[in-house]
Amino acid sequence: MSTDSLGAPPYAGDALETLIQQCLRGDQIAWEFIVRQYRRKVFNIAYKFVGKHDEAEDLTQDVFLKIFKSLNTFDRRANFQTWLISVSRNLCIDHYRSVRKEREAIDRDVDANELTPASHDPGPIAALEQRDRVVLLRRALAGLPESLRTAVLMRDIQEMSYQEIADTLRLPEGTVKSRINRGRTELARHVKRLGGDGAHP
């Protein structure tokens, strides 16, 4: 049986154990061989989280670097491919959560502007009105539960497709659509309530 097949785990048992031992001793060639064999699987996982080829490439590199550093934690009695995929997925989740926090911080400043783009340069009164809407919308968004706010931001601000959001959040597409619809309804209710209160920034 060929050890070069990419359609199945290339090594098992003693052969894989030997490769891992070589990697732990710092054998770069052995590690590069493992990377070549499993790179596509890790890339596919990364791509589901970031949705862009270049970003997935960078994330794949980071994942393999961290896997190499944690290789000594691999239980030799376990299946290596299962362990590698599990570690890869967890690292991608950590990456996504980190990026999401950064995006939410940015969204607090830019989301309302993007939701109400000006088709022309507004006059001073219109500019003040738009600024008021920005503040109002920002406050309304902050009042949504995190799950609904995240779904609305991904769809309406980041312009992600339902499938991309479902893959990123690891939820059924139907759940994603439901959250977006509920989020929009709640957002409109908050905007109306805050506007009716005559809220000021």
Image (tube, rainbow, N blue to C red):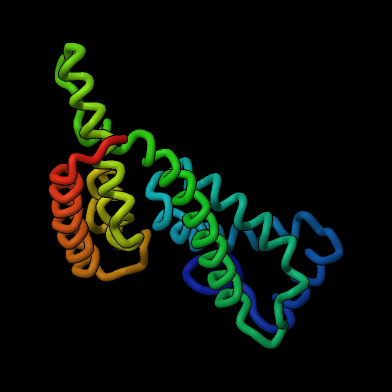
Picture mark count: 0
- Which residue shows up at 63% across the image and 75% down it? 11
Q: Quadrant of the C terminus?
A: top left
Query: Residue 159: horizontal and vertical position, in percent?
Result: 25, 43
**Left or right, residue 120 beside residue 139:** left
Q: Which of 104 and 195 is in front in this view?
A: 195
Q: Which residue in the rendered view is the most extreme toward the right?
A: 25
Q: Nearer the viewer, residue 22 or 165?
A: 165
Instruction: Tell me, yes or no, if residue 121 can be seen here.
Output: no
**Left or right, residue 84 beside residue 157:** right
Q: In which quarter of the image is the N terminus?
A: bottom right
Up-down: is 11 above or below 43? below
Query: Residue 90: horizontal and vertical position, in percent?
Result: 54, 67
- Quadrant in which residue 17 is drawn: bottom right
Up-down: is 65 above or below 134? below
- Which residue shows up at 21% across the image and 34% down it? 133
- Quadrant in which residue 171 is drawn: bottom left
Q: Which residue in the rendered view is the most extreme toward the bottom?
A: 77
Query: Residue 76: horizontal and vertical position, in percent?
Result: 72, 83
Q: Which of 60 and 186 is in front in this view?
A: 186
- Quadrant in which residue 85 is drawn: bottom right
Instruction: Tell me, yes or no, if residue 127 can be seen here.
Output: yes
- Which residue shows up at 72% across the image and 66% down it? 70
Query: Residue 81: horizontal and vertical position, in percent?
Result: 57, 74
- Which residue shows up at 65% across the image and 63% down it? 34
